[in-house]
Structure formats: C-alpha cells, structure tokens
Amino acid sequence: MRVFIFIFLLLLGCSNKYTVYRFDNGDDYYIDGLRRVEDSQKRIGYQDETGKIVIKPSFKFGFPFDNGKAKVTDCGNMREVPGSGGEHKEWISNNWYYIDKTGKRLP
C-alpha cells in the first residue's frame, strides 16, 4: 500500500498542465528560442528553452516563431493534405494573424 501511495504522489507531483506539441513524430523544435506547447484542450502556446511558459496556450493553432513573430489563429480545422495518404495534415483557417514573443498581436 505504501508503494502505491508513493507512486501516486510521485506521478501527481510530476504532472504538468501543458505538454510539448508533437511534430515530425517527436517533440516540437526550439525555433527562434521558443517551441510550441498545448493544454488539455489542444490550444497552442509557447515556452522558452528553460521550460518557462512565455505565452499561455490560447490559440486554436500556431506555427513556430520565425524572426520574432509567429502566425496563429483562433479558429479553423485540421485536414488531410489531398494525395498524402493521411501522412500529412494542414490547418485551414480564414483568420490568421501574427504575434510577437510576448503574445501581442502585430498590426
């Protein structure tokens, strides 16, 4: 019984409310010092190389940062790329915009 309680407490202490976004069959890459994370509702946010969440997950989808900005959206759906046999998917949205590394919407 003690072992069970210990393992339960260990797992509880290791739980994290955000997970690293999966890309190319592995964890997302750090690009421009940040990588994507997602919450339990699959919303996208960003963390720095120390693991600190710098932009809390709030986007329906977001691309990696490049030159200090990232393309994100608050709506849309993922679909299979035609002719890819299910191997490739793309995000479809009619409301893309860019954010800076603080999460501020760019003009």
Image: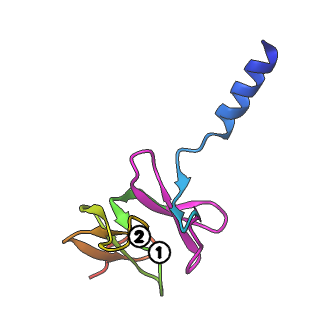
Amino acid type at circle 2 is His
Pick whichever of labels 1 and 2 is earlier in the sequence. Answer: 1
Q: Position of residue 72 (x, y in %)?
A: 34, 70
Q: Position of residue 5 (x, y in %)?
A: 74, 19
Amino acid type at circle 1 is Pro
Question: In the rendered image of this protein, does residue 67 appear above or below residue 9?
Answer: below
Residue sticking out furthest to the top: 1
Please identify, in this view, whether the residue under mark 1 or under mark 2 is nearer the observer. 2
Corner quadrant of residue 20: bottom right
Q: Position of residue 92 (x, y in %)?
A: 26, 69
Corner quadrant of residue 62: bottom left
Q: Are marks 1 and 2 in contact (CB under 8 Å)?
A: no
Residue sticking out furthest to the bottom: 67
Question: In the rendered image of this protein, does residue 103 appear above or below residue 68?
Answer: above
Q: Residue at x 77, y 24 (%)?
A: 6
Q: Which mark is residue 88?
A: 2
Viewer-closest of 92 and 84: 84
Question: In the rendered image of this protein, does residue 34 appear above or below residue 74?
Answer: below
Corner quadrant of residue 11: top right
Residues drawn in magenta = 26-54
Q: Is residue 62 left or right of residue 17?
A: left
Q: How is the image coloured?
A: rainbow
Q: Which residue is mark 1?
A: 64
Q: Identify the secondary structure beneath mark 1.
A: loop
Q: Residue 33 magenta-drawn?
A: yes
Q: Residue at x 48, y 87 (%)?
A: 67
Viewer-closest of 1 and 81: 81
